[in-house]
Amino acid sequence: MKSFEAFKVSREKMDPSTRKMSDHQWQQAYAAYCNARENARGGRSTGSTGSGGSRRRSSTTSSAQGMHAPSTLSAPGALRARVRAESAYADQRLLVNVLSWVILGAIVIVAVLQAMMLSVPSAAGAVLLFGGVQALVVIILRMMVHVIIDIPDVALYCACHAQKSGVEAPAE
C-alpha cells in the first residue's frame, strides 16, 4: 500500500484538479483508498496476482460483495427488512410468494385465452380488464398476508428490543 505522500503524488498526476483539495479532503481520500485496498485484499482469491487485469476483477467483485441497501430506506422499511431477515416464518412467506405468482400467471393466461376466443373487441377488453382487476386483488392480498405473517415477528422483535434496553412493558 502506498504511503500518504506517494498516494497524493500519484493522484495529482492522474487528476490535476486534486491540487485544490484541502488537507482534510486529502485525509478522507487516503482513508477511502486504504479501506478500498483492504476490502480488495479480503475479497481477492489466492490465485490472483497483482497485474492490472486481476486488480480490475478483484475490485469488481469487492464492489459487488459490498453492495448495500440504499440509505433512503425509511425506519419502518429498515425494521421490516431486519425482522424478515430474522423471521421464523420465512417458509410461509416463500409459500405465499410462490402461490401468488402461480395464481397471477394463471389469471393472465386465462384472461388472454378468453380474450383471444372472443370476436368482439369490447368483450375482449372487458375480459382483460376483469383479469387485471383479479391480478390486482391477488397482489393486494399477498401484501396483506405478508403483514399478517410479520405481526408475530414484529411483536417478538419489539419484546426482545425492550428487554435488551432494560425497558419493561408498562404494568396495568
Image: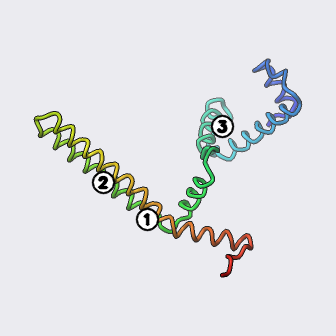
What secondary structure is marked by label 2?
helix
* Residue that extends furthest to the bottom in the rendered view of this protein: 172
| Rendered residue at 21%/45% (across/down) | 111
Q: CA distance from mark 2 to mark 3?
A: 48 Å
Q: Which percent across, then down, holds residue 120? A: 12, 35
Q: Amino acid at mark 3?
A: Thr
Label 3 crowd bin: few (<14), some (14–19), many (20+), radius 10 Å: few
Of badges 2 and 3, nearer the viewer stands 2
**Left or right of residue 144: residue 15:** right
Q: Which percent across, then down, holds residue 95? A: 38, 62
Q: Sequence-wise, which precedes: disc 1 or disc 2?
A: 1
**Left or right of residue 142: residue 151:** right
Q: Amino acid at mark 1?
A: Asp
Per the image, the residue denoted by label 3 is 49
Per the image, the residue denoted by label 1 is 91
What secondary structure is marked by label 3?
loop
Per the image, the residue denoted by label 2 is 102
Q: Amino acid at mark 2?
A: Val
**Left or right of residue 53: residue 166:** right
